[in-house]
Amino acid sequence: MKNYFYLLLLLISVSCTSDDDAVNLDSDLTTNATCSDGIKNGDEIDVDCGGSCSACMTSLSGTLSTDTQLSKANSYELTGAYIVPDGITLTIDAGVVIKAIGGTSAYIAVAQGGKININGTVTSPVVMTSGAASPAASDWGGLVICGKAPTNVGATATSEVGELIYGGSDENDSSGSIQYLRVEYSGAAYNSEKEFNGISLFGVGAGTTFKYVQSYESGDDGIEFFGGTVNGTYLVCVNSQDDSIDFADGWNGSGSYWYISGGAKAGIEGSNNSVNGNMMPVTKTTLSNITVVGPVSEGALYFKEGGGQFTIENFYASNVALGVKVKANDVESNARLTAGDLSISKFQFADVALGDIVKTNYVGDASWLGEGATSGAGNGAAAPSWTAVWTLGLDGAAASTKANLEGEIDTEVTLNSSTEYLLTSSFIIKDGGTLNIPAGTLIKAIGGTSSYIAVAQGGKINVNGTATSPVVMTSGFDSPTSSDWGGLVICGKAPTNVGATATSEVGDLTYGGTISDDNSGSIQYLRVEYSGAAYNSEKEFNGISLFGVGSGTTFEYVQSYEGGDDGIEFFGGTVVGNYLISTGSQDDSIDFADGWTGSGSYWYISGGAKAGIEGSNNGSDGNATPVTTVTLSNISVVGPVTEGALYFKEGGGSFTINNFFVSVLEDEVIKVKSTDSDAQARLINGDLKITNLTCATDIASLSSDFDFTSYANITLTTSATGAGKGATMPDWSAGWAK
């Protein structure tokens, strides 16, 4: 009996060991996931899913009871309301895709005290989208976040969707961190009066991170802030069927880099309180670097229901006819505009016919809307670089074909060579501002006398044309002619002889100083056409006017074409001007005065009405110091001219000129008035020196008060080539001049 007992134990032992070994052997043999055999094997996370199989599907609905993390390894279906309550944190890893299939009942909501951490990346954003086979706007609810920050709708309130409590007194409340999130096809109707937005932020605090977020094809607003203090940066709204970005109810956050496209109503709707426009705290925000691409039916900005206190800078509106909408019967909003509570600087219209533009429908003083040049969210109407990879629907976002140019800038702005700019009024580059103009850029002036570009002291302009792709500033009229617009005015801090500082004769800007090497930028391959409008009854614009411009400035390969006054004029300063062309000027072609102490080489002048070159010291005092002192070489003057190839005037100065070719003159080669005692004294002193002067016109046929042929410091030859080819346009003008 004892032997039978031991035998039984042995059999049981062998049997159990054999079963265990069979299971282990089975697992070892199945080294690859099958994804289809109804067994969890290989690297499968669950039966036939995860790992190298398709992601496991997890249904999301209900209220979380513990901290939860959603992983990219799984697929998620949002089948109902998914609530993150007080004390619970929902973490969503980069690359997670949540597909909503529950219609209006499907939404994600974070209650007060709950947190959501969305950890998307630029290459792997988190996506909340429709699960429908053919997705469309309003397929599901959206994302709702409720915080404890102040609003102006009560100590606390109930969210209009989700019916959660929000608001309080904790300005720094944190509802988590949201980065690189895309919410698609949201905006389902919550009831007969309310719809979900793509993302709704109710009383969300400044402790919450909210950046790199897109709403795409929302059935209502894209993103809306209901009070709170959270800041929103790098936000994108595409094709919202109501407003694109909306804020109200005492929002006291800020926003920067917002790109908005294709919204149905307002690009941005900003309001204070729909029941009482004077409720406290008043909506107060600072926005910057905004692009709104229309069409929109309620303006780039709708200042509504008491508006608030808004400061906005760098606002680019493309295909938008109405800049700022304000209802006439909105008493509180109109009062705030009167009080100066809305300030917009550097607002730029683009891609809309000039006659269709309404800057604002507000009937009062609209000086709060200042225009300028800006890149908006980063690239004008085109999608900015920071939207690349993680956003949807921006592949066709192209640069503007036309944009208005007027106002002021005090930061760096770069124009786009594929955009045609319409200069509708003055455009001023102020101290600290830099305007960069790439090769091939075309600027058309359509504002008459009021259209001009001016660089103030401390500002810079960089004209980066090339020989094959110059920058052109011209008339925008169908039949252009001289004096159609102002011109280019540059004011620097270099010395002049008209005072420690002075005011430019056009533009009323300060110029002059003591900085000889002052830098106003770099100008290369620029053509200025049909300029020279009358500034007032006594003064006209030149093509290019340089007031006290310093030697740190590059000024070369520049043409004035058909200017109504002088082509190019130097008012003091020390800048050097090389490879200059003046064609068809109706006064002097190139003029310098007021103590200019620069130099010039390779000047080609043709068709000017008066002097080819007018050089003077000071119109009020021919002996003012510093005396105009210049060295010129390789100069061609082709007439006709009526006041000499060179007019030595108003004290003249100290001029040294070499290789001077003149042709087709109707009057003097060198003009000096016998009554100009200061100029005459300088001639006697030998302050005018010209070597290698060739005159292709018969000198004997010309009349003159000054017999230059007997002047010892002028050497006549027959070999001067002037700017390169005598009377013919020089080779260096090819490709960029006309």
Image: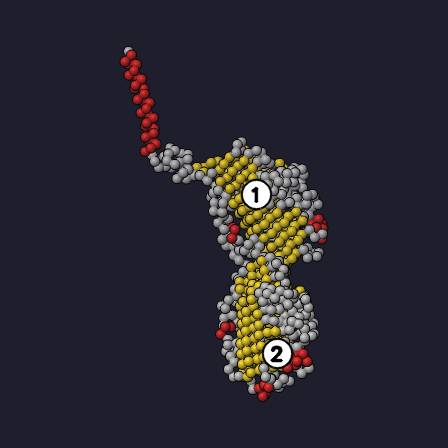
Closest to the observer, 506 or 88: 506
Q: Is residue 299 above or below residue 195?
A: below
Q: Residue furthest left?
A: 3
Q: Specify the amino acid type for callout 1.
A: Thr
Residue 48 x, y percent position in the rendering: 39, 36
Label 1, secondary structure: give it: strand
The residue at which mark 2 appears reads as 687
Residue 42: image quadrant is: top left
The residue at which mark 1 appears reads as 209
Residue 39 x, y percent position in the rendering: 37, 33
Residue 562: image quadrant is: bottom right
Residue depicted at x 65% and y 50%: 310
Q: Residue furthest top?
A: 1
Task: State which tag comes first along the sequence, 1 or 2.
Answer: 1
Residue 234 x, y percent position in the rendering: 55, 48
Distance between the alpha carbons at the discs numbered 1 and 2 = 71 Å
Q: Is residue 276 left or right of residue 27?
A: right
Label 2, secondary structure: give it: loop
Residue 723 x, y percent position in the rendering: 52, 76
Residue depicted at x 64% and y 68%: 495
Q: Specify the amino acid type for callout 2.
A: Asp
Q: Is residue 726 above or below residue 180?
A: below
Whether residue 470 is visible, yes or no, is yes
Number of residues whose C-alpha sits closer than 10 Å to that of mark 1, classed few (under 14), some (14–19) or many (20 or more): many
Number of residues whose C-alpha sits closer than 10 Å to that of mark 2, classed few (under 14), some (14–19) or many (20 or more): some
